[in-house]
Image (cartoon, coloured by chain):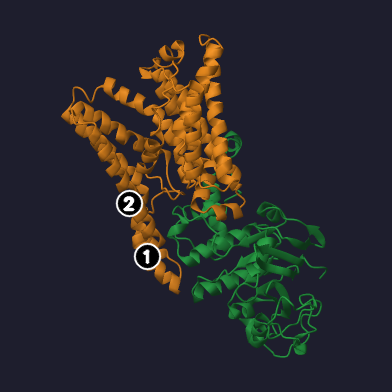
Chain colours: A green, B orange
């Protein structure tokens, strides 16, 4: 594997007096599932918004394939092959699944009518239905609005849409938050099949079980910085929680010497967890977690 | 977009899994199916109300109500309001509002009259210049509305209340408070011209309404209009240029107000500087009666057409029956509240 597909370095973002991100880093390799975890307010959603073009950073650098990029809009991120499933503002409830699927990239009729802006409803319905079925999202009808769908179906449509258009990366912000057990399993399967098709997935979630079930790697944000990185298979729940709460610090890039703005950070980092990095994701596998991998 | 669900029964059998959400969906789907049917039926219901009104008045006064003369008058009176209401439909679907339409109508009429007077007011060229000036004036005001709403992030209610005052006040300043007369050739020409027995003003209004109805239902412009009103953040995240689109929608409403101003000049022969302060409310009432949701995301031009004609038919019918015309205001008010109540109830049922 060559360099990272997507890399963020020293991203800063404040909203008024609130520093959401204070020099956050993030790394994503080609074709992997990375979970981005952290406690509430750690800056996960802000980081995703910046990496998907919804917001611009105050400072810091975003690299794609090693080249610096600046996303002024969602459109530019999309052109770079990045799609996002947003936490709660994903779909237009009054529109049909197909209309949502093609929102912003509507298919127009061929010929003169198309040039006048006429929509090709049939083509969009067929394609949306195909893509949903391919990903195991079943829709009872494609002529009713999204508002009549269940939470699971809505999430299915949102995920299917992002996956269909993404060429490089899909960000998923809490894709399983509103879902039951069965639908959650579906979404996790979906994430795996997306990865297998060569598109990298960044999963943001609070659910540690989901994290351990699908992640190739895990990056932990705390108070607006990356504080730890783990390989997905061999991390324990205690390590994840420790990193999220600050009981354990690992990433030297995230902990640049001054701890003034962070009074409750412990002075010593856990040495046990250090030394794992991207180039050697499998070293330091203390526990065998085959069953996690097989899930 | 608003096609009815085929049957709640098939929905129930096809609802996906046995998970908690599957259960919720199953329990919810008969209700959801019912509300869908009611939702899509709002135009149908309100259309039936209109038909019922027409039938009742025709039966009560067959010799004076159900005559082509009376009905044509009724349609001609409604034609100008229809233009305002169609623009308002787009605006309200984006979950906005445009209180300024009456002011823009008057202001556009005044600028058009000034320009026509300055250019002789008799030649065809002068009259054509008048319509261009009227529409351009409306367009500029509309762009101002849209820019303040989209980029200034000022609530549309405030923006358009402000431009209503500015345009009405501006029109009074330009005219010195005295109504200007429209050029005689315009008033006696376009104002009276008929084509196949129907006033040309009505034809213009019908053509504009048809085109905009098709664009709303069938074109990308319409799709984005619904998307913004339904969930503007989702629309933005999907790559819809929300701010630009909002400017276009308010510009369209302004453009139509400008055209309405010119047609109003032709029909009534005066600029009517003080006669249009409630046009906005009439247009909003028509749009809402026609089933467009004040919360945005839903509505049709067909509904708006019906919504324009219900108050018009009531007024006309009451006049012929000798009922005090004040009753029309009372009844329209009640219909308006009923329509919004229906919309609220429908949304509540949907969101559960």
Q: Is residue B134 visible?
A: yes
State the residue in front, B71 or A225: A225
State the residue in front, B279 or A272: B279
For mark 2, what is the residue?
B341
Closer to the observer: label 1 or label 2?
Answer: 2
Compared to A191, does A249 lie above or below? below
Checking the image for residue A167, the label placed there is none
Secondary structure at numbered mark 2:
helix
> In which quadrant will I find the C terminus of chain B?
bottom left
The structure residue drawn at horizontal position 24% and vertical position 37%, both measured from the top left corner, is B52
User: What is the spatial separation of the Cα atoms under label 1 and label 2, in whole angstroms?
Assistant: 21 Å
Secondary structure at numbered mark 1:
helix
**Residue B243: x %, y % from top left:** 59, 46
The structure residue drawn at horizontal position 20% and vertical position 31%, both measured from the top left corner, is B324
For mark 1, what is the residue?
B28
Total of numbered circles in the picture?
A: 2
């Amino acid at each position: 594997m060559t360099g990272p597909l997507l890399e963020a370095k020293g991203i800063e973002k404040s909203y008024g007096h609130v520093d959401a991100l204070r020099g956050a880093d993030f790394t994503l390799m080609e074709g992997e599932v990375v979970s981005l975890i952290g406690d509430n307010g750690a800056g996960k959603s802000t980081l995703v918004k910046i990496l998907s073009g919804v917001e611009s950073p105050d400072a810091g650098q975003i690299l794609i394939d090693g080249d610096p990029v600046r996303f002024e809009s969602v459109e530019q991120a999309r052109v770079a092959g990045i799609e996002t499933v947003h936490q709660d503002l994903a779909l237009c409830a009054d529109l049909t699944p197909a209309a949502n699927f093609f929102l912003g990239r509507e298919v127009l009729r061929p010929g003169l009518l198309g040039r006048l802006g006429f929509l090709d409803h049939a083509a969009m319905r067929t394609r949306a239905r195909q893509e949903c079925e391919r990903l195991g999202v079943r829709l009872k009808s494609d002529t009713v609005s999204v508002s009549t769908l269940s939470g699971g179906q809505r999430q299915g449509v949102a995920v299917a849409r992002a996956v269909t258009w993404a060429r490089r990366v899909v960000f998923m912000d809490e894709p399983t938050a509103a879902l039951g057990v069965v639908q959650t399993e579906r979404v996790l399967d979906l994430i795996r099949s997306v990865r297998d098709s060569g598109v990298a997935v960044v999963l943001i979630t609070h659910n540690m079980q989901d994290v351990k079930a699908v992640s190739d790697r895990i990056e932990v944000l705390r108070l607006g910085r990356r504080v730890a990185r783990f390989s997905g298979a061999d991390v324990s729940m205690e390590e994840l929680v420790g990193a999220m709460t600050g009981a354990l610090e690992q990433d030297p890039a995230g902990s640049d010497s001054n701890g003034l703005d962070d009074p409750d950070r412990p002075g010593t980092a856990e040495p046990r967890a250090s030394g794992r990095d991207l180039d050697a994701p499998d070293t330091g596998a203390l526990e065998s977690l085959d069953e996690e991998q097989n899930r | 977009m608003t096609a009815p669900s085929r049957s709640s029964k098939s929905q129930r059998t096809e609802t996906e899994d046995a998970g908690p959400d599957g259960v919720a969906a199953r329990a919810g789907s008969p209700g959801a199916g019912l509300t869908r049917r009611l939702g899509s039926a709002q135009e149908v219901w309100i259309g039936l109300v209109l038909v019922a009104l027409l039938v009742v008045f025709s039966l009560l006064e067959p010799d004076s109500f159900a005559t082509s003369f009376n009905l044509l008058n009724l349609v001609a009176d409604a034609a100008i309001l229809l233009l305002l209401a169609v623009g308002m439909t787009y605006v309200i679907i984006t979950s906005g509002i445009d209180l300024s339409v009456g002011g823009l109508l008057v202001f556009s009429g005044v600028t058009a009259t000034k320009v026509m007077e300055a250019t002789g007011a008799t030649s065809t060229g002068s009259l054509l210049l008048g319509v261009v000036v009227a529409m351009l004036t409306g367009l500029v005001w509309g762009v101002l509305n849209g820019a303040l709403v989209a980029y200034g992030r000022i609530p549309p209610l405030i923006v358009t209340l402000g431009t209503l005052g500015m345009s009405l006040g501006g029109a009074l300043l330009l005219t010195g408070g005295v109504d200007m007369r429209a050029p005689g050739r315009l008033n006696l020409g376009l104002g009276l011209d008929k084509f196949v027995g129907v006033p040309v003003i009505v034809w213009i209004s019908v053509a504009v309404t048809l085109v905009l109805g098709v664009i709303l239902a069938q074109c990308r412009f319409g799709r984005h209009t619904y998307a913004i009103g339904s969930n503007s953040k989702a629309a933005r995240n999907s790559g819809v240029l929300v701010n630009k689109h909002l400017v276009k929608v308010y510009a369209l409403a302004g453009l139509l107000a400008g055209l309405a101003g010119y047609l109003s000049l032709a029909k009534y022969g005066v600029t009517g500087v003080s006669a249009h302060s409630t046009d906005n409310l009439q247009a909003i009432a028509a749009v809402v009666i026609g089933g467009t949701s004040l919360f945005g995301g839903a509505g049709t031009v067909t509904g708006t057409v019906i919504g324009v004609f219900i108050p018009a038919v009531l007024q006309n019918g009451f006049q012929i029956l000798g009922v005090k015309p004040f009753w029309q205001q009372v009844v329209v008010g009640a219909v308006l509240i009923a329509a919004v109540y229906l919309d609220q109830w429908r949304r509540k049922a949907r969101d559960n």
